[in-house]
Image (tube, rainbow, N blue to C red):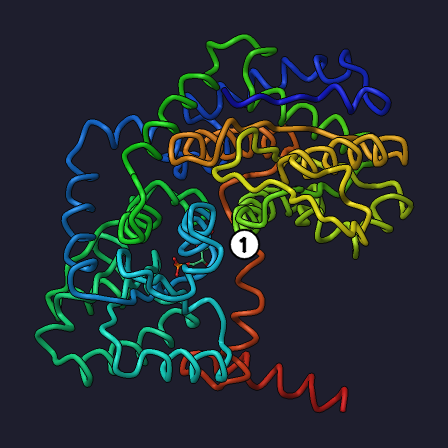
């Protein structure tokens, strides 16, 4: 099972200090379970997994995935933030590190777009898609996000031109609001297959809705096991479970106890590069949920041992405002033994015959000891294996902990008012109709500065 070990935070916060947060955690869990806290119109994710298992959603998604898998060699997922990070996190966690870059003949290649506004990125993407059998999953809850709409506009045109309107209708799928937004209007008008993002699930909590499940199913992974894992974690982290046994409660309490002692930055660490995008998903989840009202633990991430050769120095001896949360995968999928070498020029024969993962695990342990000695508290989350079931558990574990943690911090963990600021300025600078007043003001401000 998944384990959370906070024993290496003891030099910085006593267990009693973590345990002292139990009443606050209990209150937070009650707020989540009874929907009495701030942002309570966005807690549909709480029992989403178990509810999904009682519906036909998984088979409906599999049916649509089968069409895309049959008719496409490449599927482009257009979305940003919560509308792409979860799918990418899961697909990259399971994918082969190399053949995912090209179609391996069994599963369509999954590419991502609509998460930046880079002209070069879009040029190279559209070039790459030329002559390929591609489809598009257009994901936007609001249906109005500039990055996604812009990419989709290009992809729709290219798909229709190259594959014909009829085929385009079969290989473009929309995942959006049930009623509102341009993506819904377009899907209904064109007759695309579509799935609904529930009103009460925010973007960063939506990986177990069709937002994540459809791309993951198209990529060839078992979405039922993913959802089953999450449903199991729902039970394991409910308010009825004792504080000490509730993994999300203990993690949320430990990180808040550390925060209250000045540890303002949390670094999510992995020793498996496949988890790089899992960290990106986690950063959005915690960053958007907690960073507001002048508060919040700053979520950052590193891939070890790679980043030990770049960020290791800072972590070991920089400002002591950080703590680490390590995701440790017990069992790797493949076996590679260190070979014997007669010349032994690199001096590595002492490792001959041993698994590479043993070296990695000792790097992990050695790093933990060094960083704790250097003043960095360490939380360790152990996952038995990278499978759909365990990843489903891990996703829900972090979601639940995030809800609890946000309430412990005293913020609404389910809104993101701050993300509107750049959009307003961008639209004003681009003279978007309706932004005339803002355009005038921002231009006057820039002229004054010039
Ligand atoms: O978590 C969030 O709410 C955001 O990251 C959104 O998911 C992101 O901005 C994309 O929004 P939309 O799905 O409306 O295009």
Quadrant of the displayed image that contains ligand 1: bottom left
**Can you give x and y, in whole percent of width and height, for residue 33 in the image?**
42, 22
At 66% across and 87% down in the image, what residue appears?
444
At 24% across and 50% down in the image, what residue appears?
196
Q: Nearer the viewer, residue 60 or 332?
A: 332
Which quarter of the figure has residue 338?
Answer: top right
Left or right relative to 338: residue 231: left
Is residue 197 visible in the rendered structure shown here? no
Image quarter of the C terminus: bottom right
* 6 up-or-down from 187: above or below: above
Is residue 172 visible in the rendered structure shown here? yes
**Can you give x and y, in whole percent of width and height, for residue 265 in the image?**
75, 43
Q: Which of 36 and 217 is in front in this view?
A: 217
Could you say whether the residue bearing mark 1 is in a helix, strand or loop?
helix
Which quarter of the figure has residue 297?
Answer: top right
Which quarter of the figure has residue 262?
Answer: top right
Left or right relative to 66: residue 352: right
**Can you give x and y, in whole percent of width and height, for residue 4 in the image?**
61, 22
At 16% across and 65% down in the image, what residue appears?
71
Q: Mark 1 points at which residue?
A: 417
Q: Nearer the viewer, residue 232 or 270?
A: 270
**Can you give x and y, in whole percent of width and height, for residue 200 in the image?**
34, 40
Q: Which residue is situated farthest in the left direction here?
A: 166
Number of residues whose C-alpha sits closer than 10 Å to that of mark 1, classed few (under 14), some (14–19) or many (20 or more): few
Left or right relative to 248: residue 62: left
């Amino acid at each position: 099972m998944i384990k959370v070990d906070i024993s290496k935070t003891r030099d910085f916060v006593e267990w009693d200090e973590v345990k002292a947060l139990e009443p606050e955690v209990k209150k937070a869990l009650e707020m989540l379970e009874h929907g009495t806290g701030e942002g309570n119109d966005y807690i549909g994710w709480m029992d989403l997994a178990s509810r999904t298992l009682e519906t036909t959603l998984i088979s409906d998604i599999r049916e649509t995935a089968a069409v895309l898998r049959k008719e496409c060699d490449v599927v482009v997922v257009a979305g940003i933030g919560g509308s792409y990070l979860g799918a990418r996190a899961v697909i990259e966690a399971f994918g082969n590190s190399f053949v995912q870059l090209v179609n391996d003949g069994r599963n369509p290649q999954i590419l991502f777009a609509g998460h930046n506004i880079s002209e070069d990125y879009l040029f190279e993407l559209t070039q790459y898609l030329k002559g390929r059998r591609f489809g598009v999953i257009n994901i936007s809850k609001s249906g109005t996000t500039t990055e996604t709409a812009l990419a989709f506009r290009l992809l729709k045109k290219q798909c229709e031109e190259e594959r014909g309107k009829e085929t385009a209708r079969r290989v473009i799928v929309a995942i959006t609001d049930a009623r509102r937004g341009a993506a819904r209007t377009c899907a209904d008008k064109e007759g695309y297959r579509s799935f609904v993002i529930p009103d009460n699930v925010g973007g960063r909590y939506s990986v177990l809705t069709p937002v994540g499940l459809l791309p993951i199913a198209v990529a060839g992974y078992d979405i039922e096991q993913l959802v089953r894992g999450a449903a199991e974690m729902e039970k394991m982290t409910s308010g009825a479970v004792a504080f000490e046994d509730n993994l999300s409660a203990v993690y949320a309490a430990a990180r808040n106890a550390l925060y209250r002692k000045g540890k303002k930055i949390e670094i999510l660490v992995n020793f498996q590069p496949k988890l790089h995008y899992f960290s990106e998903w986690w950063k959005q989840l915690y960053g958007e949920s907690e960073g507001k009202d002048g508060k919040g633990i700053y979520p950052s991430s590193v891939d070890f041992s790679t980043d030990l050769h770049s960020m290791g120095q800072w972590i070991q001896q920089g400002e002591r405002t950080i703590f680490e949360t390590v995701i440790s995968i017990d069992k790797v999928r493949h076996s590679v033994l260190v070979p014997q070498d007669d010349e032994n020029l690199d001096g590595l024969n002492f490792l001959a015959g041993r698994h590479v993962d043993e070296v990695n695990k000792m790097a992990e342990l050695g790093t933990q000891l060094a960083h704790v000695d250097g003043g960095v508290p360490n939380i360790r989350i152990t996952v038995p294996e990278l499978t759909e079931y365990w990843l489903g558990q891990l996703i829900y574990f972090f979601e639940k902990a995030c809800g609890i943690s946000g309430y412990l911090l005293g913020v609404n963990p389910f809104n993101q008012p701050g993300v509107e600021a750049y959009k307003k300025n961008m639209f004003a600078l681009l003279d978007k109709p309706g932004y005339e007043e803002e355009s005038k003001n921002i231009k006057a401000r820039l002229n004054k500065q010039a």
